[in-house]
Amino acid sequence: MKNSKNVILFLILVLVLMWNPLTAYLYYSAHEVYDSKILSFIFWLIPIVGIVAMVYVKRKDTVSPRVEGIVFNSAYVGILLGVLVLINFLIGVFTKPDTSNPDQVLKEEGLIFKPNSAAVYTTVEFNYRADINSLGLRNKEI
């Protein structure tokens, strides 16, 4: 039981190190999403809950298998999500957008179709024109 207790404490420690206000600042300070109250709440809540869980697990002589499983699974999922956020951050760091023309709003390629174009369908039964928005979708402009 002592060994599993140490594993749980280690996982909680890794979780707290991955999800804290300092990492939020490092990941998002250059973006407008950094001002999000929800994101700030998440990056403050997880370390607080993690520290409370560490104190709880440390003070108990034995932790029930049910609590052990819940804490282990929660820490594991949090670490996996933290790794995904880290990968997302690293992709953004190493693939900077082209800033040679900052006034350029339209991109040459859209999500599906060429932006701001039209697709005309003509058959024996009907004629249809589908306008493509600036994102490359057949939808109204967002």
Image (tube, grey):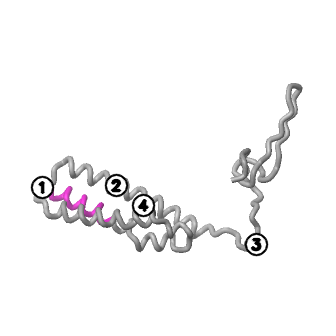
Give the labeled residue for mark 2: 76
Mark 2 secondary-structure assignment: helix
Question: The disc labelled 4 sits on which kind of residue?
Answer: Gly
State yes or no: discs 1 and 3 in contact (Cβ < 8 Å): no
Distance Cα–Cα, label 4 vs label 1: 29 Å
Majority secondary structure of magenta residues: helix
- Look at label 2 and name its amino acid: Tyr
**Dot label at residue 101:** 3
Residue occupied by mark 1: 62
- The residue segment tinted magenta is 1-14
Q: CA distance from mark 2 to mark 3?
A: 43 Å
Q: Is residue 85 magenta?
A: no
Can you tell which of label 1 and label 3 is closer to the viewer?
3
Q: Name the residue tied to disc 4.
A: 82
Q: CA distance from mark 1 to mark 3?
A: 62 Å
Tags 2 and 3 touching, CB below 8 Å: no
Packing grade of label 1 (10 A; few <14, some 14-19, many >=20) is: few
**Which callout, 1 or 3, points at the residue further toward the start of the chain?**
1
Question: Which percent across, then down, holds residue 54?
Answer: 23, 64
Q: Quadrant of the rendered structure where residue 7 is?
A: bottom left
In which quadrant will I find the N terminus?
A: bottom left
User: Type of residue at label 1?
Assistant: Thr
Mark before the other along the chain sequence, 4 or 3: 4
Q: Earlier in the sequence, mark 4 or mark 1?
A: 1
Residue 91 sits above or below residue 25 on the image: above
**Residue at 38% in and 69% down:** 20
